[in-house]
Image: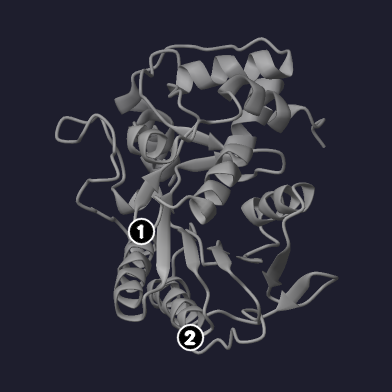
Amino acid sequence: MYLVTGASGFIGRSLCTYLARHGQAHRAAVRESAGPGQIGIGGIDGRTDWASALRDIDVIIHLAGLAHVRDAGPSVGADMMSINRDGTRRLAEQAAAAGVRRLVYVSSIKVNGESTGGRAGPECFRSSDVPSPVGAYAASKWAAEQALHRVGGEAGLEYVIVRPPLVYGPGVGANFLRLAKLIRRGLPLPFAAVENRRSFVYVDNLVSLLVTCAEHERAAGETFLVSDGEDLSTRQLVLRIAEATGTRARLVPCPPALLRAAASLLGRREDMEKLTGSLAVDIGHTREALGWRPLVTVDEGLRRTLSVPET
């Protein structure tokens, strides 16, 4: 039986749907119990009692955690360490004591770093890279990975680490949805001169890899990167979103440096860095070690994501 933490989140809902569709018994861990097959575990930190959630569990897919927040107050870094690092360590320790076979941890590509393709950066991130986390969120994810290494070595718990880039799919929000809305409305976008390179992963592709990592004998102790297998520039992304929504993209050229400078004045530098910078991943190790391939193409993933009418 699977235990899915963070089951009420964007990825967790898709994972539970996949497991149910394939007849795989699973228990959904949520903050508060809300229905059949779910169990409430309250807040997550170094004191959480996972005993009832872990009963008869063979494999855990650990999605729950505190994600990156824009308005980072003075306590956010400590909160992230408490939830992401200490909460993961506590879960792993109790899982080992309960006889759980394997824990699959969904980390973040930000453990590798913030960007690729720059003057001093790599062309793409690889699973073998020396971690270079930047910021509280990435640091807490890397600390959680290190905690799993220690618990796995001491208690014999199998673990697998997956570091996804931006995940999209039906129900996605944040910058991805805002960009799609601008394209649908036919507004001119200043990305014609942006030739960056970014990796994305459709939620069903990520889910298929997580289940593969839960079951594949060669996955234990490994770190895997994941993507759709096709990288896009922001200019290409705009064109592909327009095609998926049956609209016409209106792109105008503007130097990326000027875009970043203007965004800084508006307090949106981080958002513009994502739109003009590169973050590409190499999934060669994932393909070779697990025989895994993305199930859904970028174009199909965008079509499914954007097929819901705008509200």
Residue in the image at 45% along x and 41% along y? 271
Query: What residue does disc 2 label?
Result: 97
Look at the picture and state if 26 lies above or below 212. Answer: below
Q: Residue 196, labelled with which disc?
A: none
- Given this view, does label 1 or label 2 mark the residue nearer the observer? 2
Circle 2 crowding by C-alpha within 10 Å: few under 14, some 14–19, many from 20: some
- The location of residue 98, given as percent across then percent down, is 54, 83
Q: Is residue 190 visible?
A: no
Image quarter for residue 75?
bottom left
Q: Is residue 80 left or right of residue 222?
A: right
Residue 138 circle label: 1
Q: Earlier in the sequence, mark 1 or mark 2?
A: 2
Check disc 1 and give the amino acid type.
Ala
Classify mark 1: helix, strand or loop: helix
Depth check, front residue: 56 or 161: 56
Does 95 sit left or right of 40 as displayed?
left
Q: Please provide percent x and percent y for residue 292.
A: 48, 35
User: Where residue 286 sits: x, y (%)?
Assistant: 39, 39
Marker count (numbered): 2
Mark 1 is surrounded, within 10 Å at the Cα level, by few (under 14), some (14 to 19) or many (20 or more) other residues, namely many
Mark 1 → mark 2, Cα distance in angstroms:
28 Å
Indicate the amino acid at tag 2: Ala
Judged from the image, the secondary structure of the residue bearing numbered disc 2 is helix
User: Could you say which is closer to the camera, residue 62 or residue 99?
Assistant: 99
Q: Is residue 38 visible?
A: yes
What residue is drawn where x is 82% and y is 30%?
A: 309
In front: 267, or 15? 15
Q: Quadrant of residue 150?
A: bottom left
